[in-house]
């Protein structure tokens, strides 16, 4: 683990690769645009100097036969088909924005995910 204040990755990971700047692609978004890319694509962005928030949004789609091997449980919302494996706690669709039930689920999920992501970390206080 190599935690640093300027690194937002969970365990302080970094990509130890040589990057030829001629092979990079600069993508400048205008307000209201979004960028979609594979989760394993190396990407970065310059600091946000505007008064507006920069929002990150990640969706992971996995098959029901996949299972969590670190945390005691994992969570999901079935978006297609059926779950014949039972490896996930099925999270109910929120009934309204920011409801007490939805926030309770959110906290439970984050706490469980942190257990998995920081498993074995010496400094999990980040």
Image: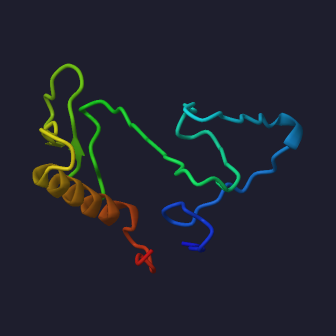
Please indicate whether residue 103 sits to the left or right of residue 120 in the image.
Answer: left
Residue 71 lies, with reference to residue 54, above or below; the image says below
Residue drawn at x 31%, y 58% as measured from the top left = 113
Residue 7 lies, with reference to residue 94, above or below; the image says below
At which x and y percent is residue 9? 54, 60
Residue 118 lies, with reference to residue 53, above or below; the image says below
Residue drawn at x 67%, y 48% as measured from the top left = 44
Q: Quadrant of the C terminus?
A: bottom left
At which x and y percent is residue 25? 77, 34
The one nearer the camera, 122 or 38, is 38
Please indicate whether residue 1 sits to the left or right of residue 87 in the image.
Answer: right
Residue drawn at x 39%, y 61% as measured from the top left = 117
At which x and y percent is residue 125? 41, 78
Residue drawn at x 23%, y 21% as measured from the top left = 80
At which x and y percent is residue 110? 28, 59
Q: Is residue 6 visible?
A: yes
Q: Is residue 72 visible?
A: no
The one nearer the camera, 121 or 96, is 96
Task: Specify the farthest residue to the right.
Answer: 22
């Amino acid at each position: 683990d190599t935690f640093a204040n300027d690194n937002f990755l969970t365990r302080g990971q970094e990509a130890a690769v040589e990057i030829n700047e001629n092979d990079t692609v600069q993508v400048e978004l205008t307000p209201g645009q979004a960028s979609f890319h594979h989760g394993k694509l190396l990407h970065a962005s310059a600091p946000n100097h505007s008064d507006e928030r920069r929002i990150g949004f990640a969706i992971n789609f996995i098959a029901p036969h996949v299972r969590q091997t670190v945390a005691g449980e994992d969570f999901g919302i079935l978006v297609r088909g059926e779950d014949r494996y039972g490896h996930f706690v099925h999270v109910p669709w929120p009934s309204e924005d920011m409801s007490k039930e939805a926030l309770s689920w959110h906290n439970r999920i984050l706490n469980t995910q942190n257990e998995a992501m920081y498993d074995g970390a010496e400094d999990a206080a980040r």
